[in-house]
Amino acid sequence: MYDDKYGFLGAAEKAADIVILSILWLLCCIPAVTAVPAGAALYYTVVKYLRRGRGKLFQVFWGAFLQNMKQGIALSAAVCVYGIITLNWLAFAGQFEVTSAQGMIFTITSRVLLVFGLFSQVYLCPVLSRFRGTVKSILLGAVYMGYRYFFSSLCAAVLLAAALYAVYVLPVSAAAVPAVYMLLLSFPAERNMKKYMKGLEAEDADQWYLE
């Protein structure tokens, strides 16, 4: 879709698409329970539309959003519950002195919960956007991918932290950071997920996801 011969105009068009996608994602996240399907739609559109040049932006995004709605809402609820438990456990553990045996146990447990949740969510939206299955299978697939490809997950976690910091320092960057994050995440994620997509029934005649 984007041809190098257009130079600045092509780059500007892609930048505009990144902003539009980020704003679409933000709007679809207003109900917290739709955050995961919105993330899956953002990831899917970034790869199919921005990187592969297939389809139309709104059509691709909205189609992916609706397709992943059922499993996505359940996964959003699971993520919210896990997040609430982890944050409360972190607050509880902070009441104890780390030098005591009890405090050390609570501190280590809270950090394990935090790291496990962080690494498990890295592949949640990519896996949901690409594979069909039950909520359980999608969640287990995301956990497996997150730890099977530990280094890329670690890099993605660092990238996510940088993205959150950028939004914290400059709130207006939220209009572009979500799509940029998914775009950068898609390079290792697509390479890793492609290994599990070969041999699967094609989702359409144009198997762009295997390119």
Image (cartoon, rainbow, N blue to C red):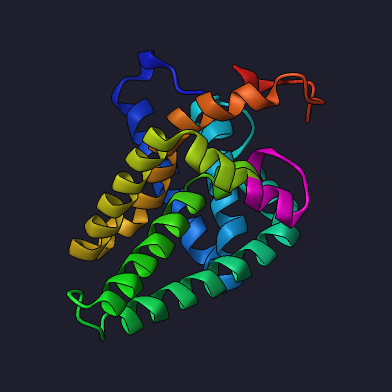
Residue sitting nearer the eye, 102 or 210:
102
Q: Is residue 102 left or right of residue 206?
A: left
* Magenta residue check for 130: yes
Q: Is residue 199 visible?
A: yes
Query: Picture coordinates of residue 191 (x, y %)?
Result: 51, 24
Quarter holding residue 135: bottom right
Exactly how many numbered labels are in the figure? 0
Residue in the picture at 69% in, 26% down: 197
Image quarter hosting the C terminus: top right
Q: Is residue 35 above or below residue 184?
A: below
Query: Picture coordinates of residue 17 (x, y %)?
Result: 44, 42
* Magenta residue check for 197: no
Residue located farthest toward the top when viewing the structure as drawn: 5
Residue in the picture at 58% in, 32% down: 48
Magenta stretch bounds:
128-140
Q: Is residue 126 above or below residue 9?
A: below
Q: Is residue 80 above or below residue 70?
A: below
Q: Is residue 168 above or below residue 64?
A: below
Query: Picture coordinates of residue 166 (x, y %)?
Result: 23, 56
Residue in the picture at 20% in, 74% down: 98
Quarter holding residue 181: top left
Residue located farthest toward the right when viewing the structure as drawn: 201
Q: Is residue 14 left or right of residue 60?
A: left
Query: Picture coordinates of residue 94 (x, y %)?
Result: 26, 80
Residue in the picture at 50% in, 57% down: 25
Q: Main secondary structure of the magenta part?
A: helix
Q: Is residue 176 visible?
A: no
